[in-house]
Every structure is written in C-alpha cells, then in structure tokens.
Image (cartoon, rainbow, N blue to C red):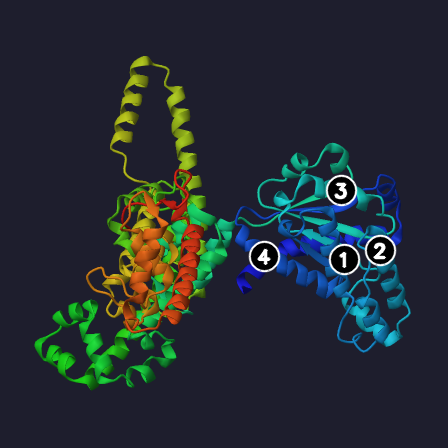
Amino acid sequence: QQIQEDLNKQLLENLVSFLSRSHSNFQEKTTEWTCRMKFREIPTAALVLGVNVTDHDLTFKGLSDVLQNNITPYVALLEAKDCPGIKNLMQKLMGQLMNCDIDVDSLEDEDCVQVSQNRIRCSMSSLISWYESVKKKTDSETPSKKRNSSSRHWQSPPVVVIFKDMESFTTKVLQDFIVISSQHIHELPLVLIFGIATSPMIIHRLLPHSVSSLLCIELFQSLSCKEHLSTIIDKLLLTSRFPFKLGEKVLQVLINIFLYHDFSVQNFIKGFQLCIMEHFYSQPLSVLCCQVVDIKKRAYSLSHDQCENIRKLPSFRRYVEKQESGKQVALLTNDSFLKEDTEKLLEDLHIYHENYVTILRCLHVFTSSLPKYPLGKQIRELHCACLENRVWETEEYESSLQLARMLNKTDLVNMLQQCVEILMSSSGREFDKTAEKLKVFLTQFQNLQAEASQERDVSVSSQKELQKKTDLYHLQKTLLELKESRRSKKLTKFEMLRFEVVDYIDSLVRKYLVPAEDRTLHEIVYFNTASVLRGHLNAAPRTALHTALNNPHWYLKNQALKCDGGGISNKAPDICIVYKLHLECGRLINLVDWLEAFSTVVMAAEEPNADAASSDQVDDTIHARFIRAVSELELLGFIKPSKQKTDHVARLTWGGC
C-alpha cells in the first residue's frame, strides 16, 4: 500500500494543483472564471487509470483522503450501479456531501443535528442552499475554530464529484447532471473528476458536443499497471529485507494471471499473500524463514522431529552426499551438530540472496540497454530466467553477450557507472573489490580517449600520403597492402577492453546468479508448489460445485456424510440427495418418481412403527424439503421446467467432472 501511494503521489499532486487553479479562479472572480461562467464551463479532470479496474478503488481512496484532509471536506464518490437515474444520482450526491458537514465537534450542536435529520428535497437548488448555509456557518465561527478549520481546508472549499467508472454511467444521466450543474456553476464551485478505464475519447462518445462543450477538461494519466507491477516485484521480491521468496513457477503463475487476465496489482498482492499463508501453513520448517538476526535462536530451538524434517529435504540430502563420511554420520545422527550446521547454511542462504539481487541488477543494466531484449526488458523477466535454470547456459544469454560485445564506448561507460553505484549501495562486503575493478575499467576507458585522438591523426596523415601517389601501380600496390592489413588486423585496445569488461560481468553472473534450487535448504524460504496456487486462483466452479453436491464430506468434514461405493447418505443436505438422484435419470425427470426416491432415502432412518398422524406430517415436511431442493437445483442451472410434460423437468448438465 505504501509503494502504491508513492507511485500515485505525482498524480495526486497534479490533481491538487488543478483543483487549486480552478478554485482560485472561482474565489478571486478573475476574468478567466468570468468567461467560464459566461460559457457555463465546469472544471473537469479526466483521470485515465487503465483497465485494471480492481486497483481503482485504492487510487480513489487515496485521492479522496488527500482532498478531504487538505482541500475540501465536500467530496462525493459516485458509482454507476448506484445511479441508474438522475434522481438516484442527486440522492447519492447530497447524502454523501451532507454527511461531510457532521464532524465530532459539531455533534454537540443541536441545531446541526436537527437540520441533518430533516428531509431535504434532492435538487441542485437545495444543494446550493445547503452549501451557502454551511459557508455562512463557517464564516461565523469563533477565530480559534476558524483557524483550525482553515489550516486543513481552503476558504470556500470546492465541491468535488468523482465518477469512479464513467464508462458504466448511462448517457442520459451524465448529460442531465452536466447540463443542470452548468446552469448553477456561478453559485456552486463544482469540480468533476471522471475515472476512465479505457480512453479519454469515451467522453466524446458518451456526450454530444453540446454537452461536452460545457466541460473545461484537463487530462491526467496514471502510471501503467505494468510499471506498478515492476515496482512491486522490485520492492517486495528483489530484496533481502523479506526472507520469504517465490519460486520460478509460482512467480510465473502470478505474472501470467496478471498479464492475461486482469492487469490487477491488487490481485497479484492477494496471490502473494496466499503464497505466504500456504507456505507457513504447509511447510513444517517455515519457522526458520526469518530475518538473519533470528536464525541462530530459532535453529537451536528446533525439536527432534523438526531436525528429522530437515534431513528429509532433497537439497539437504544432496548436501550430505557431498560431505566426508564422518560429517555425514554427524549430520544424520547428532541433532546438536545438525542445528549448528543449519545455522551456517541459512546464513549462507541469506548472503546468497543479497549477492543475487545485486548482480541481478547489474546484469539488468546491461540487458535492458541492448538494441534487442533477448532476456526481456523488465527485471522480472530476467529474474524468472535466472530462477528457472543456469541463465548462462541459455541461447538468450549468449545472444545478449554478443550484443554487449558490440556496444559503443559511451553506452559501456554509462553501464559501468550504474553498476558501480549498485555495488557501492549493496550491503555485501565482498563487492568492494568488484566495484574497484569496475572503476579501473572506467579509468582505462578514459585513458583510451587520448590514444584514440593520436591514432586519428596517424590515419589522417596516411590518407594524405596515399593521395600523393598518383602512379597507378604504386596506388594499386598500396591499396592491396591496406586490404591485407585490415584482414589480419588485430583488435584495438578499445575492443580488447570491451571484451574484458563483458567477460568479467559474465564471470560475476556465473558466480552469483546460481538458481535457488541449487542452494541447500532453499525449501525453507522458497514457495514452489505452483499446482496448489493454481488450484486456489484458477477457479473451476463446475468441478467445485459437483464435488460439493456429490461428496459433501469433502468440504464439511463430517464423518456421518462419508459414503463408500457411491451410496446416498440420508444425513446429507437435501440438495445433495436430490442432486445424486438426478444423476441417475435421463434427459427428462419425472417429479413424482423423483419425490418418491427422495422420500425413500430420507425415511431410511425413520422408525417403522411411527403413527399415521406423524407420518402425514412427515410427508408434508419431506414434500416441502423436496420442493426447496429442486428449486435450488434450478437456480444453480442443473434443471429447467419442461414444456413437453408439465410434471417433468429437463436435465441441463451431462458428463463427469
């Protein structure tokens, strides 16, 4: 949430500046505002937020909070579902605005409460009268109260109306509201904000020119959702601050859902939270997924069962196989020795993460500056490639190296300078020598500048000598010598230095960007079960519905509902009994036969000696239960009434799940 607030900070500042200009014009009655009144133009901000509609609520909440805390208490948020007509819109608008008039200090004022309890006719004239009365009341307050209120809000604060989803509003509602508001703009400092998910052209598609000409529109564009996602991944995942990590497949599932379904950063965060809960719930060793300062304390507090769980980890088994026989026996039999070694391994894993992130950023500096993007332009794409396998063994990496060996001096120097800054800001101690090495490369590139100018002078003099040779034989002989020299020409000092720089970056990649799966005890901090995540996020409603109705024990965990061999329990919910009976029928189902079968199953546990009166009462109850269950099945879409036979219903679903 803090990251998204920082990303929206510039957008909110621009909107506040827009409101300030509009409000100052109204307050000072300048020539511009006079002209605007003459043409009845309403100050309007067109806020383009993108198609990630689920993220808009957070943006509008932040905007509303900023406006109410610093500018005006009169902010109304309107949604299309609440405003099917102009009457509903005015009711919603006035209801929200008049609630703004009631704060903690004014609750003791009986007149204010009495006024707020009166029923006020929802019209623009009523809104103007209310605004003028509130303004007069504010002006007549004591100096201390006035000073406190003016410190937060402007004098004569504007009335801001935010249409959260403009595309969903009907054309008539928007037209009526804009036309009515424009006729009273000289009495009420109204400002409109349109939340747009698609394109600003939607304003002109929804509104005719006669209506859109009543708006003084200024366009505001938020950051793209992809930029939001890249920042979220950069701040949450590519950092050693948080010990919990996502595996390559899990991260790819979340990114694919983002890119191919909803572009929602909020849903990405929810998926990330789900991964955290699933990891700490299903991984018995997740107690060791902690900050580095807590590793020693938690490692030495492990129980014998937890030590056995560590010994079962595949990465730990591979680690044990590489040790000498004496250490192998100690790791597998001595818990104290295992705890001590676990502490060292987890600290090494933490250091690995710090080094990994630093070198990944350096590699991204190179790959993102290439003319093509074999490893992707975004750092998240590079991160996924490094998590998946040894990135230096891929064709994309080889293509990137080839392109890097053709970079010019200016680009190469800029990249090295950025890498030095990244290494200097890193907390890893071993990168001091690496930063010094890159600084040496930068010094060598600067020294090449003087040598390049000297070589340029030599080439100019040789060309002048070539021009002096006018004899055809000598000229041809000289050209052939130049051609042979170019063929056997050695690499220049710049080219040799460029190759050395690229090879050095390659050596850092091979040393520090080893996949996490190759590290011991990575299972403790990495969540890798992508299938579980898909089961939670990729909804399969038909399968879930069939499972719930056919096997209610799966969800309710009630042993009385457990049935073997496809039987039907009489203790199951009525809809489950009706559903399983309907699976045994054909296309048309006779309601009488269905009721008799339902009654047989339900009455299976009843005593046979029940009296006739109670039997009739039970029949009525069973009949009512059956009707309700059939109605629920119809609501879920499994059956529908049949026009062929009045006492039959038709099945709508076939096949298994």
Front residue of this view, candidates 44 and 394: 44
Per the model, the C-alpha gap separating discs 1 and 4 is: 21 Å
Q: Earlier in the sequence, mark 2 or mark 3?
A: 2
| Callout 2 touching callout 3 (CB < 8 Å) | no
Q: Earlier in the sequence, mark 4 or mark 3?
A: 4
Return the mark for residue 57: 4
User: Residue farthest to the front?
Assistant: 612
Q: Position of residue 546 (x, y in %)?
A: 33, 55
Mark 4 or 2, which is nearer the eye? Answer: 2
Q: Identify residue type, mark 2.
A: Ser
Looking at the rendered structure, the secondary structure element under dot 2 is helix
Q: Position of residue 380 (x, y in %)?
A: 40, 53
Residue at the disc numbered 3 = 176
Return the mark for residue 126: 2
Give the image quarter of residue 521: bottom left
Residue at the disc numbered 1 = 94
| Callout 1 touching callout 4 (CB < 8 Å) | no
Q: Earlier in the sequence, mark 2 or mark 1?
A: 1
Crowd around label 4: few <14 · some 14–19 · many ≥20 (10 Å): few
Q: Position of residue 312 (x, y in %)?
A: 18, 72
Give the image quarter of residue 643: top left
Per the model, the C-alpha gap separating discs 4 and 3 is: 26 Å
Instruction: Please determine whether, in this image, residue 487 is positioned above or below residue 423.
Output: above
